[in-house]
Amino acid sequence: MGQRRDEVLRAAIELLDEVGLDGLTMRLLASRLGVRASALYRHYPSKQALLDAMVAHLVTPPADAAPIPDSSWDERLRGVATGAREVMLAHRDGARLMSTFRHPGGEAVAAFHGLIAALAAAGVPEDTAAVAVDTVLAYVNGYTIEQQARETGADAWSGERRDRVFRDGLELIITGVRASL
């Protein structure tokens, strides 16, 4: 069942890229796979479980990915923020998909706590570190949701300008965290 489950997951991500989050239905996915919708529930008990699996798949680095080198807390926050944004931008409605998760999976939770630990090790009080990491992730998601929503309309901002403004906003958050040291 694992191979078929992976096939369903890959097809769901491909369908997301084609029709967007609003168009992604279990019925359409089943049709794409040549099965009845009820067959999908053998692999994912609900659409929410499928969405959670899609998020976990997208945020989990591939097995052959190079390990993240030890770096300062602010470099790690920048890396996580820009990496998450890149993943979201690589998929239609990627940021909206990320905001749907209810059960992020063990690796995502471990990465979240790892970032908090890195900030705490640098002297940021643990409560502040948790708020800082959560704020950065919320900023990335919110900024990217706005960016993806505006890409469908008349938007005078270039990709380069959007990237610069994103980085500037991220630096404001990091500067605020640094002030707590």
Image (cartoon, rainbow, N blue to C red):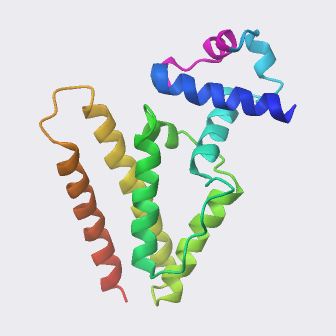
Residue at the image point whose x is 61% and y is 69% from the top? 67
**In the image, residue 52 lies at what x, y percent?**
64, 40
125 versus 43 height, above or below: below
Quarter of the image with the N terminus is: top right
Highlighted magenta segment, given as a residue range: 21-32
Is-magenta flag for residue 51? no
1 vs 33, left or right, is right
Quarter of the image with the C terminus is: bottom left
Q: Quadrant of residue 159?
A: top left
Give the residue furthest to the left.
156
- Total marks shown come to 0
151 versus 24 height, above or below: below
126 versus 5 height, above or below: below
**In the image, residue 56 lies at what x, y percent?**
63, 46
6 vs 168, left or right, is right
Specify the principal SS of the magenta part.
helix
